[in-house]
Image (cartoon, rainbow, N blue to C red):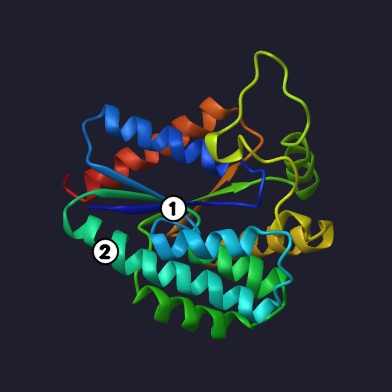
């Protein structure tokens, strides 16, 4: 089947678009599996808790290795079996995030080194399509800040954010960090235009969902399913 991922800086709307895509695939009768990174397995969820806990002081290299360990477990335990079973796999983040956040954002590795590591971690697994929701860092910052404002009666938040009252450890990294991450994502899209489709994250939720769905339908047709 096909393996697709959604990327972007925190606040770009990845999780929202991932849920919309999964819902449309299910409505179309597709057998679909959804995963988020880090997470998806018992081990990976434990690692996620550590990585996002603001009480932990984690140096850049251990951070990189923890993200990679969570991904390796997810690929072998969940993603490869799902693809072998003929399912569509949707993942909220994958190795592009490691390149952008740890490689460039933390300044821990040159592109060739981190690309080699990513390939080893995933066993060479490459998404068929990655949608990059591109958003100016200052707008992404504004959206992240809104997560912790009191809600109006008509408003709701995604389930994974419902109990959050303060930024997680990654979100506390500072604006200069997110500026580097955003630029890294743009550089990745320019380097791999056959895989990474850059979308304007400022578009409405429905406009983005429609663009992603049209591309997904094309991918499924090309895959002969």
Q: Which residue is mark 2?
A: 80
Residue sitting nearer the eye, 51 or 199? 51
Report helix, strand or loop for mark 1: strand
Residue indicated by mark 1: 5
Query: Which quadrant would residue 155 be assigned to in this image?
Result: top right
Q: Which mark is residue 159?
A: none
Question: On screen, 33 above or below 211?
Answer: below
Q: Report whether 134 appears left or right of 5.
A: right
Q: Residue 114: image x %, image y %?
A: 55, 80
Q: Residue at x 56, y 29 (%)?
A: 205
| Viewer-nearest residue: 116 or 168 | 168
Q: Report the label total.
A: 2
Residue 193 in view: no
Q: Residues within 10 Å of mark 2 (few under 14, many from 20)?
A: some
Q: Quadrant of residue 64?
A: bottom right
Please tell me which residue is depicted at 22% across the width and 52% down the height of the picture: 1
Q: Nearer the viewer, residue 150 or 111?
A: 150
Q: In what element is the residue under mark 2?
A: helix
Other residues around mark 1 within 10 Å, as few (<14) / some (14–19) / many (≥20) = many
For the point 54% across and 69% down, the residue is 67
Image x and y of residue 122, in percent: 38, 73
Residue ID at (61%, 34%): 162
Q: At which x and y percent is residue 26?
A: 28, 32
* Mark closer to the chain start, 2 or 1: 1
Lateral position of residue 181 relative to residue 210, left or right = right
Is residue 93 found left or right of 174 in the rendered image? left
Quarter holding residue 202: top right
Closer-to-camera residue (12/163) = 163
Real-space CA distance between mark 2 and mark 1, rounded to the nearest whole angstrom = 14 Å
Tell me residue 213's x, y (percent): 39, 35
């Amino acid at each position: 089947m096909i393996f697709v991922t959604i990327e972007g800086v925190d606040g770009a709307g990845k999780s929202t678009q991932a849920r919309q895509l999964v819902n449309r695939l299910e409505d179309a009768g597709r057998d679909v599996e959804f995963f988020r990174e880090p997470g998806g397995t018992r081990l990976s969820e434990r690692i996620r808790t550590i990585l996002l806990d603001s009480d932990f002081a984690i140096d850049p290299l251990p951070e990189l290795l923890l993200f990679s360990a969570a991904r390796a477990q997810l690929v072998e335990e969940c993603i490869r079996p799902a693809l072998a079973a003929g399912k569509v796999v949707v993942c909220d983040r994958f190795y592009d995030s490691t390149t952008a956040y740890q490689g460039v954002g933390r300044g821990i590795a040159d592109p060739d080194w981190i690309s080699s590591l990513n390939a080893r971690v995933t066993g060479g697994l490459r998404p068929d399509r990655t949608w990059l929701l591109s958003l100016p860092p200052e707008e992404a910052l504004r959206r992240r800040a809104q997560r912790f404002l009191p809600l109006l009666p008509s408003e709701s938040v995604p389930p994974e954010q419902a109990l959050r009252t303060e930024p997680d450890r990654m979100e506390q990294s500072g604006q200069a960090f997110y500026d580097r991450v955003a630029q890294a994502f743009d550089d990745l899209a320019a380097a791999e235009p056959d895989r990474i489709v850059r979308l304007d994250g400022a578009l409405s939720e429905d406009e983005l969902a429609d663009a992603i769905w049209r591309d997904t339908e094309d991918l499924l047709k090309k895959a002969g399913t």
